[in-house]
Image (cartoon, rainbow, N blue to C red):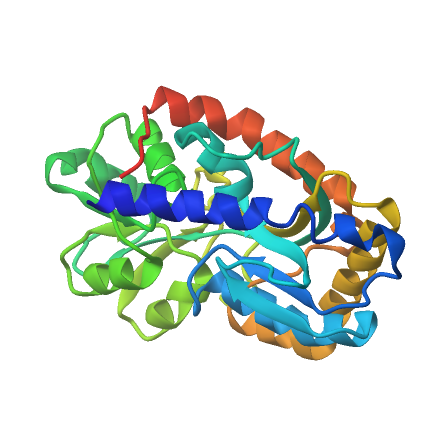
């Protein structure tokens, strides 16, 4: 049943993303944007990418002089449509599902918005005090270990695959419909470890409900400077990131892409937006990386890196 619901959700996302194709194409004979803009968020309300979209919508509205409406896995109606998404939609899903769209050939990148690490955390009952001790504990107790994640093939799942590869052993993965219920089970001791985003877990770490071992990056988080990096912890091969970008359908005029990119980069420079993003543990990528070319290069690099790993691990829809 869970697998069927997951497949239905993936196809719903695909239909929503494909629905973009006509909405901007119809703008060729008019000045863009002369109608409201719908931003598709292929996640439920309340998550990281829903928050990202809502934080950016207001400053983008000021630049574009049009309303920006957030639609969580919905359709475009009579408005122009852009999609905000992550490696889940534009990299990983294509290695797991028979998608009704091509993640590369059916879309044009507009702007890379954010790129940030995840945290490696455990329930507080785990005796390990640092990442090396955690790896040793996982290896010694792997038959009893359960690791939570928010969906097959996502960064949280891939983080666990990498942990297993380094440890040389396997343990159980427990998929959840979102990070929140998974984290509640880690806090409650029903799940041992997890690799959540700082946005969803940092408050729990800082309040002592979770133990954090490392940030999966070479730089410490400004919002959590006491958590070491995986490099400092002795595992530089554990670099993983969650990125978010804007996409439009293939064939969208370059002038429209340039206008949307300008609106996005202006929104990312807005001090209030940056403060809101920092408060949920997200850091804006440098201005020179907020380009269509940078987003395309990151998508290509992730496809080349993760597709073979996903297929070798035989990750299937759950």
Residue 244's x, y, as percent?
Answer: 59, 52
The quadrant where residue 84 appears: bottom right
**Residue placed at 28% from the left, 47% from the top?**
5
Q: In the image as oriented, which residue stretches furthest toward the left?
A: 144
Q: Is residue 313 visible?
A: yes
Q: Is residue 104 above or below residue 216?
A: above
Q: Which residue is at the front of the view, 172 or 204? A: 172
Q: Is residue 202 left or right of residue 19?
A: left
- The total number of labels drawn is 0
Residue 169's x, y, as percent?
Answer: 23, 27
Q: Is residue 166 above or below residue 155?
A: above
Residue 207's x, y, as percent?
Answer: 32, 75
Q: Is residue 170 above or below residue 113?
A: above
Q: Which residue is at the front of the view, 58 or 28? A: 28
**Residue placed at 57% from the left, 47% from the top?**
17
**Residue placed at 63% from the left, 31% from the top?**
300
Q: Which residue is at the front of the view, 298 or 206? A: 298
Q: Is residue 114 visible?
A: no
Q: Is residue 168 left or right of residue 218?
A: left
The quadrant where residue 189 appears: bottom left
**Residue placed at 47% from the left, 33% from the top?**
99
The quadrant where residue 1 appears: top left
Q: Is residue 82 left or right of residue 46?
A: right
Residue 293's x, y, as percent?
Answer: 77, 40
Q: Which residue is at the front of the view, 263 or 105? A: 105
């Amino acid at each position: 049943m869970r697998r069927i619901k997951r497949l239905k959700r993936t196809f719903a996302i695909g239909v929503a993303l494909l629905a973009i194709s006509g909405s901007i194409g119809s703008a060729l004979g008019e000045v863009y944007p002369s109608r409201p803009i719908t931003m598709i968020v292929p996640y439920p309300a309340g998550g990281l990418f829903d928050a990202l979209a809502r934080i950016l919508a207001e400053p983008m509205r000021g630049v574009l002089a049009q309303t920006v409406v957030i639609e969580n896995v919905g359709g475009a109606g009579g408005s122009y449509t852009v999609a905000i998404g992550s490696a889940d939609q534009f990299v990983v899903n294509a290695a797991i599902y028979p998608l009704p769209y091509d993640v590369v050939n059916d879309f044009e990148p507009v702007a890379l918005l954010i790129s940030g690490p995840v945290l490696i955390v455990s329930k507080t009952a785990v005796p390990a005090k640092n990442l090396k001790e955690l790896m040793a504990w996982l290896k010694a107790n792997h038959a009893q270990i359960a690791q939570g994640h928010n969906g097959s093939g996502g960064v949280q799942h891939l983080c666990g695959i990498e942990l297993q590869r380094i440890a040389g052993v396997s343990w159980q993965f427990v998929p959840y419909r979102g990070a929140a219920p998974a984290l509640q089970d880690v806090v409650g001791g029903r799940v041992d470890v997890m690799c959540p985003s700082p946005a969803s877990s940092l408050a729990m770490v800082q309040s002592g409900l979770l133990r954090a071992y490392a940030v999966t990056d070479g730089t410490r988080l400004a919002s959590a400077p006491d958590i070491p990096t995986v490099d400092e912890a002795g595992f530089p091969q554990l670099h993983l990131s969650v990125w978010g970008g804007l996409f439009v359908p293939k064939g969208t005029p370059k002038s429209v892409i340039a206008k949307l990119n300008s609106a996005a980069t202006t929104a990312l420079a807005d001090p209030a937006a940056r403060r809101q993003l920092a408060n949920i543990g997200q850091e804006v990528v440098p201005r020179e990386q907020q380009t269509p070319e940078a987003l395309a290069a990151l998508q290509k690099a992730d496809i080349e890196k993760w597709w073979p790993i996903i297929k070798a691990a035989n990750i299937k829809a759950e």
